[in-house]
Amino acid sequence: MANSAGGWSAMAFALVWLSRSRYLSGIVLGVASFYLLNVGYAVMSDLRGYVWSLSLSNFFVLMSFVAGPPIGLAAAWMRSRSTWVVAIASSALPAVLIGEGIYGLTVVAETTSPVYWITSIASGVAFLAAVSFIRLRSFAPTALSVGLTVIGAAAFLQIY
């Protein structure tokens, strides 16, 4: 999971959601979560005798400031009373999980096992299904969530 945008995003999303943060603090905690995951990775790398830079020149540290705000905000928005806000928020994490899963199966399939990538896609779909049944409960918000997930996963594939 340490080498996976989906795994890190799921962990950051869960940490912010569990914190019960409001919107602005969700954004800040999203960045902090990603950055602290890098700190943990640096500590473990050091213990193994490797070096892991925590400077902004490290792509993954930089991504803390790029991915942290939308993931943190989405996690905070999941607690909204508005079905439409939840529909928008519920697309962020599955977009990363599904997008990276497709990336794994199509780009790095020759060097990695497909099990993780299939699990990533299935997790994204399961998250969408659970939110649809538990929180959205009607066609239009569910369609919005699924549509934004597809767009987000396609964007993830283009950017990644």
Image (tube, helix red, strand yellow):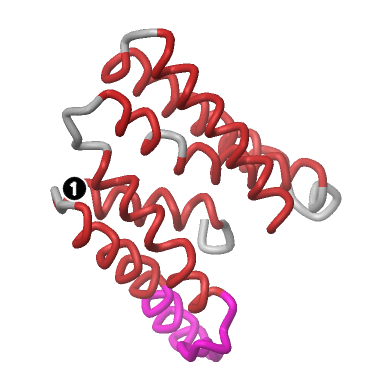
Point out the residue furthest to the top here.
Answer: 138
Classify mark 1: residues with Cα within 10 Å, few (<14), some (14-19) or many (20+). Answer: few
Q: Amino acid at mark 1?
A: Leu
Q: Nearer the viewer, residue 29 or 5?
A: 29
**Residue denoted by label 1:** 18
Position of 74 with respect to 58 (left or right) is left
Magenta stretch contains residue 92:
no
Identity of the residue drawn at 43% across and 19% down: 129
Q: Is residue 151 above or below residue 73?
A: above
Point out the residue furthest to the right here.
Answer: 110
Position of 86 with respect to 114 (left or right) is left
Position of 27 with respect to 19 (left or right) is right
Identity of the residue drawn at 41% across and 48% down: 10
Identity of the residue drawn at 38% across and 80% down: 39
Task: Specify the quadrant of the image occupied by residue 116.
Answer: top right
Magenta stretch contains residue 48:
yes
Q: Nearer the viewer, residue 83 or 10?
A: 83
Q: Is residue 65 above or below residue 158?
A: below
Q: Nearer the viewer, residue 56 or 7?
A: 56
Identity of the residue drawn at 54% across and 40% down: 95
Percent across and percent down for residue 48 are: 50, 84
Task: Specify the quadrant of the image occupied by residue 149.
Answer: top right
Task: Specify the quadrant of the image occupied by residue 30.
Answer: bottom left
Q: Nearer the viewer, residue 28 or 41?
A: 28
Percent across and percent down for residue 96 are: 55, 46
Quarter of the figure with the C terminus = bottom right
Report the magenta residues as a range.
38-59
Percent across and percent down for residue 154 are: 68, 41
Percent across and percent down for residue 12 are: 35, 56
